[in-house]
């Protein structure tokens, strides 16, 4: 018996595909980019210098009420993942499951873990140097990864938040966007620049250092994604970078001189 030939993707028209991209980003990282621009404008027009201001990432929505605070944190993570589910749905409808098309699987392979750890070591180290330099020169706000108190679920929630950030960003702004722009006929270099610019935009709330650092990271990730053909190694790298940043800050803030805290 001759195996059946896989059906070609049933793509919508270019117009509908373009509308799909705009809607996905309007519900996710595009909206975050606009919010980051507004936040940055507020920071640069504030009386105090950028270096004297603070950008907090994971905050406590119910101080003194740990179970309510945990509920809000879990809700925040779950709701942030809805656009990823939407992307998975849209791609499945066009016969392009994310696992096969983007290399975005439920669990990373062994090679994904190895490649991701290597990328995380390089990007994470370079990013820390850039952040410290930008903050020291007044081009960046002081980034406080968390203001959560010493609650029992602080570290698990920070790890979960780091993984959520990685899933949302790498699936949507890396795999999905590059794939769709390619289907629209965009040149690789143009799509890569667009992906990196979007990534940079929603980190602008951190300051100029956050903008530049994430733009460079976006270009590197786009290049590696095209080389490996899988989102997962970059997702692993991003998750590791954020986990180390979040948990490391909790362990080191106030104990080492080189880490700005604004506590």
Image (cartoon, rainbow, N blue to C red):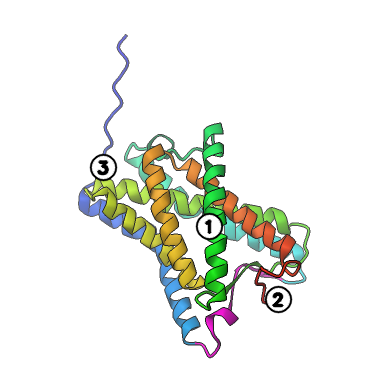
**Quarter of image, res 63:** bottom right
Q: Earlier in the sequence, mark 3 or mark 2?
A: 3
Note whether 166 is above or below 97 in the view shown: below
Q: Position of residue 228 (x, y in %)?
A: 41, 38
The residue to which callout 3 is attached is: 11
Which quarter of the rendering shows the N terminus? Answer: top left
Which quarter of the rendering shows the C terminus? Answer: bottom right
Q: Position of residue 243 (x, y in %)?
A: 63, 53
Secondary structure found at label 1: helix
- Does any portion of residue 215 appear in the rendered image? yes
For residue 63, the mark is none
The residue to which callout 2 is attached is: 263
Q: Earlier in the sequence, mark 1 or mark 2?
A: 1
Instruction: Give the extent of the magenta segment.
Output: 46-62
Q: Nearer the viewer, residue 216 or 106?
A: 216
The residue to which callout 1 is attached is: 126
Question: What residue do we see at 50% from left, 76% from top?
Answer: 139
Per the model, the C-alpha gap separating discs 3 and 2 is 52 Å
Q: Nearer the viewer, residue 117 or 153?
A: 117
Please state if 4 lies on the left or on the right of 207 as rendered: left
Q: Nearer the viewer, mark 1 or mark 2?
A: 1
Note whether 15 is above or below 110 in the view shown: below
Please state if 137 lies on the left or on the right of 216 as rendered: right
């Amino acid at each position: 018996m001759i195996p059946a030939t896989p059906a070609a993707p049933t793509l919508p028209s270019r117009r509908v595909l373009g509308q799909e991209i705009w809607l996905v980003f309007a519900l996710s990282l595009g909206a975050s980019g606009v919010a980051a621009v507004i936040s940055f404008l507020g920071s640069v027009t504030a009386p105090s210098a950028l270096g004297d201001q603070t950008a907090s990432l994971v905050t406590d929505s119910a101080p003194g009420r740990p179970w309510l605070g945990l509920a809000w944190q879990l809700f925040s993570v779950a709701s942030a993942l809805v656009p990823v589910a939407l992307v998975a749905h849209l791609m499945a409808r066009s016969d392009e499951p994310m696992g096969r098309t983007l290399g975005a699987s439920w669990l990373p392979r062994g090679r994904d873990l190895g490649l991701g750890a290597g990328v995380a070591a390089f990007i994470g180290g370079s990013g820390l140097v850039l952040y410290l330099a930008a903050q020291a020169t007044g081009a960046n706000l002081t980034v406080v990864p968390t203001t959560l108190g010493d609650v029992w679920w602080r570290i698990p929630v920070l790890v979960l938040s780091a993984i959520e950030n990685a899933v949302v960003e790498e699936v949507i702004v890396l795999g999905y966007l590059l794939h769709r722009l390619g289907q629209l006929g965009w040149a690789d270099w143009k799509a890569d620049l667009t992906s990196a610019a979007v990534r940079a935009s929603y980190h602008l709330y951190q300051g100029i250092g956050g903008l530049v650092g994430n733009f460079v990271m976006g270009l590197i990730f786009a290049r590696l994604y095209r080389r490996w053909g899988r989102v997962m190694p970059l997702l692993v790298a991003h998750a590791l970078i954020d986990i180390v940043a979040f948990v490391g800050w909790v362990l080191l803030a106030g104990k080492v001189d080189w880490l700005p805290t604004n506590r």
